[in-house]
Image (cartoon, grey):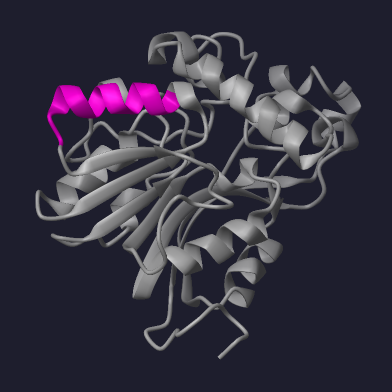
Amino acid sequence: MSTDQQIKDMVRRKYSEIALQDKADNLSSCCGAGGCSTEVYNIMTDDYTSMEGYNADADLGLGCGLPTQFAQIKKGDTVIDLGSGAGNDCFVARHETGETGKVIGIDFTPAMIEKARANAEKLQYNNVEFRQGDIEKMPVTANAADVVVSNCVLNLVPNKDGVFKEIFRVLKPGGHFSISDIVLDGTLPPAIQQAAEMYAGCVSGAIQKNEYLRLIQTNGFTNITIQKEKPIIIPDDILAGYLSAEEIKNNPVGIYSITVYAEKPTTACCPPGCC
């Protein structure tokens, strides 16, 4: 891959394209829809349809978990969703926080923001808003949120340490996050690491599981808990575009979706390391 800015520009272009398609079109080219697989965007998605607050128009099938299911959102909470897409997790969170709470979705793709705002307007939700911005520098004041959620987004961000610092900043003392993301156990083959499609598909931008958890801890969070973990299997017909048959057979790397919970301490008075 190239520079951080080039990576961001590539991700923005790809997810702008996805925002302009409907879910059926997105799924028609992924392994989750049956038939041949040519893209990796939807192979790791979980089923939201039984969750309260679910809205089909907001579900683009791009996640890798159900973070709002584990987020322990209470009535009246302020919730921030990182990489909010068309609004799926925001609307589920809104059901949990109720009319007395507030939900803020942040996404850096203008087409996604437009789609999410249109969905919120149709639902007549006046306590859900969408802000365009980079989650490495969130357009949110410090100590604003009770809960932060995110679904398969941090792996797309070059500066993951910076995102965890921002999550710490925007959470209230005693607040917490529940984040679903992709992590690795082992080293991806170079052809996968360097593939733009595999980065945008949430694979080659993932880091080692131990490093991911270490970043959470070193940024001051406590009570770190893996709430759910599942292996992600990339179909051979996708891998064949990057690897030989022998490489596919002997590839030992493990790719996992984890949903991880952590808390900002109630005594946190400033960013980690300064108190």
Looking at the figure, which quarter contains the N terminus?
top right
Residue under the image location 52 percent in, 35 percent down:
108
User: Horizontally, is 208 left or right of 190 in the view?
Assistant: left
In this rendering, the answer to whether 12 lies above or below 180 is above
Find residue 204 and report its horizontal and vertical position in percent: 73, 38
What is the chief secondary structure element of the magenta stretch?
helix
In the rendered image, residue 136, in percent from the top left (x then y), is placed at: 59, 52
Residue 265 occupies which quadrant of the picture? Answer: bottom left
- Residues rendered magenta in the picture: 112-125
Q: In this image, 262 relative to 192: left or right?
A: left
Up the image or down, 47 lies above or below 260; here it is above
Residue 64 visible in image: yes
**Relative to 179, does residue 32 appear above or below in the rendering?**
above
The residue located at (71%, 29%) in the rendering is 198
Residue nearest the observer in this picture, 29 or 265? 265
Q: Position of residue 160 (x, y in %)?
A: 65, 55
Does the magenta run of residues contain 131?
no
Residue 59 shows in this picture: no
| Residue 122 belongs to the span the image colors magenta | yes
Residue furthest out toward the left = 99
